[in-house]
Image: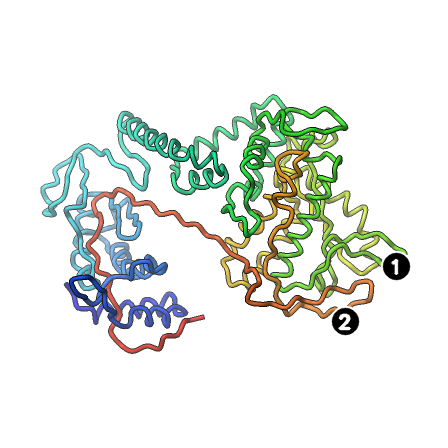
């Protein structure tokens, strides 16, 4: 077992080189040797990353990076056709001499870093003689294996592999039956996040989707599939069900919404006094009887306004000229959005299945949203110009395809939120579209899937100050609300990043016995690097 001082210095150097902002935190966590208590006594934690440390995989990879870089730089390893790693699980493929040289580098360099090859967990595949390998490992001349859940081998092996996975999947589905009765949204997320997927199935799904779009005899089905295939359109299916964040649907709501999304029969789920309902529920999401459309519009307005306030943008809702002018071209008014001018966001929801737009929507994705944007610009741009505002239509299709102008606004809003909340931008983008798009299949009980009683009030994200402009700097007709006081009880914007890890089966290098090198012992103040 190597000493911890030299690997510790290397660890600190690597953290300083690649992630200097993490060095204070890493030194505080690993700069000493805490006690690990057991009923029979205690021992000191001197090597390896701490169990449960979310940065543990990153710290381990920093040390392993030196080994991988040495293999890449070695001339004898140029004939490697594959060098792939999933933390301590590696795959080496190529000529026998190249693989043997890579193993030698790991054996020579690894111990000084606290890395050792566990030969008993390695597997070696070759069609020819492998006597040159002195390592004690399982060997086979038949390349039947799987890498990260993808089978490699002949037809019979791959068929058997997927048959076994199908059996496992069937067992998983049977366990989810009880959960799906209670909460189908939770059951779907468990299935999506816990079962994993394989590239083989993913490519088959993509090919199937393309064939469905090209061969569908129904213009309505083509328009639906094109709209649903837009970027972020399906974000509502990926949100983590949360009642507190307003991202949870009641069981009957979720089931009908999914049937509508898939183009299945939703007969018997709604009633309209004006017209006979179509079995696929398309009329439900555009019906103006009972105020359902207004209810959905207001939810979108409040959600966007809440996001703007969380991004420290001075925001007001339902703003117009004031006085005797009762027009309100701004569903959401953002102060000083574009070169000192206020932005008037005008929200509208358009259906790609409306007869007037259906012929174009069945051939061009986003036709309904882009057409709605043009109509809103024609209706409100003159009034916004009089008020000194920039008119920005926020059009979205019923299946979740946002128009070009709306995507531009949401992209810029995501950048603001990412900075103000210190969250990864990609996670913020997913949160924004998930929160907004889950509103789209939601209409009161008289229509498609949901009731206002179940989700009439959605929690607001935290509203922070300072605003970009003070209310006193605006004309009376454009006064914006005073920023709310932020208290300890303010609901925080939560960025949800779900990472799924799978333990793969390895080739050649498998499951190193890897005591992670601990930094050299030294005192470090318990400060967290911001």
Q: Position of residue 301 (x, y in %)?
A: 69, 51
Q: Name the residue rendered at 67%, 25% in the picture.
A: 278
Q: Position of residue 353 (x, y in %)?
A: 68, 31
Looking at the image, residue 489 sits to the left or right of residue 67; the answer is right
Label 2 vs label 1: CA separation? Answer: 18 Å
Residue 325 vs residue 171, the one in the foreground: 171
| SS label for mark 1 | loop
Q: Position of residue 4 (x, y in %)?
A: 20, 69
Residue 123 picture quarter: top left
Q: Residues within 10 Å of mark 1 (few under 14, many from 20)?
A: few
Q: Name the residue rendered at 32%, 61% in the picture.
A: 59
Q: Name the residue rendered at 26%, 72% in the picture.
A: 32
Q: Quadrant of the C terminus?
A: bottom left
| SS label for mark 2 | helix
> Which residue in the protein does label 1 denote?
323
Q: Residues within 10 Å of mark 2 (few under 14, many from 20)?
A: few
Q: Work out whether 463 lies above or below 242.
A: below
Q: Work out whether 358 lies above or below 36.
A: above
Residue 367 picture quarter: top right
Residue 463 vs residue 9, the one in the foreground: 463
Looking at the image, residue 286 sits to the left or right of residue 186; the answer is right
Q: Position of residue 516 (x, y in %)?
A: 24, 61
> Which residue in the protein does label 2 denote?
472
Mark 2 and mark 1 lie on one chain; the one further toward the N terminus is 1
């Amino acid at each position: 077992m190597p000493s911890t001082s030299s690997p510790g210095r290397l660890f600190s150097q690597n953290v300083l080189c690649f992630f200097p902002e993490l060095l204070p935190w890493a030194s505080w966590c690993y700069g000493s040797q805490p006690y690990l208590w057991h009923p029979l006594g205690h021992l000191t934690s001197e090597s390896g990353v701490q169990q449960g440390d979310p940065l543990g995989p990153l710290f381990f990879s920093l040390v392993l990076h030196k080994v991988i870089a040495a293999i890449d730089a070695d001339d004898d390893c140029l004939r490697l056709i594959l060098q792939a790693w999933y933390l301590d699980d590696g795959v080496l493929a190529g000529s026998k001499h190249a693989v043997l040289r890579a193993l030698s580098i790991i054996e020579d360099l690894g111990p000084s870093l606290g890395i050792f090859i566990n030969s008993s967990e390695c597997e070696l595949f070759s069609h020819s003689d492998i006597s040159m390998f002195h390592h004690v490992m399982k060997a086979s001349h038949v390349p039947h294996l799987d890498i990260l859940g993808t089978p490699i081998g002949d037809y019979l092996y791959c068929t058997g592999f997927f048959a076994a996975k199908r059996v496992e999947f069937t067992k998983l589905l049977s366990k989810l039956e009880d959960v799906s009765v209670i909460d189908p949204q939770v059951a779907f997320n468990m299935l999506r996040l816990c079962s994993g997927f394989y590239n083989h199935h993913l490519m088959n799904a993509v090919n199937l989707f393309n064939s469905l779009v090209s061969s569908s005899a129904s213009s309505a089905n083509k328009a639906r599939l094109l709209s649903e295939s837009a970027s972020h359109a399906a974000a509502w299916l990926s949100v983590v069900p949360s009642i507190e964040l307003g991202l949870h649907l009641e069981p009957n709501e979720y089931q009908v919404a999914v049937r509508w999304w898939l183009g299945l029969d939703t007969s018997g789920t709604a009633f309209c006094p004006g017209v006979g309902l179509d079995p696929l529920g398309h009329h439900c999401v555009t019906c103006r009887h009972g105020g359902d459309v207004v209810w959905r519009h207001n939810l979108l307005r409040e959600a966007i306004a809440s996001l703007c306030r969380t991004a420290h943008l001075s925001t007001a809702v339902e703003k117009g000229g004031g006085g005797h002018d009762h027009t309100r071209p701004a569903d959401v008014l953002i102060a000083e959005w574009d070169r000192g001018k206020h932005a008037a966001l005008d929200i509208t929801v358009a259906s790609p299945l409306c007869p007037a737009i259906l012929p174009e929507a069945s051939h061009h994705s986003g036709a309904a949203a882009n057409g709605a944007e043009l109509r809103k610009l024609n209706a409100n741009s003159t009034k916004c110009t009089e008020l000194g505002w920039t008119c920005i239509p926020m059009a979205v299709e019923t299946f979740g395809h946002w128009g070009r102008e709306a995507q531009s606004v949401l992209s810029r809003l995501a950048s603001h939120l990412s900075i103000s909340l210190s969250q990864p931008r990609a996670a913020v983008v997913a949160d924004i579209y998930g929160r907004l798009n889950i509103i789209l299949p939601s209409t009161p009980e008289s229509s498609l899937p949901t009731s206002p009683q179940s989700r009439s009030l959605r929690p607001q994200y935290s509203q922070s100050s300072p605003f970009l402009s003070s209310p006193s700097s605006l004309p009376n007709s454009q006064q914006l609300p005073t920023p709310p006081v932020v208290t300890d009880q303010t609901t925080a914007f939560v960025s949800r990043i779900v990472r799924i890890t799978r333990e793969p089966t390895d080739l050649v290098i498998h499951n190193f016995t890897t005591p992670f090198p601990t930094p050299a012992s030294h005192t470090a103040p318990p400060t967290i690097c911001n």
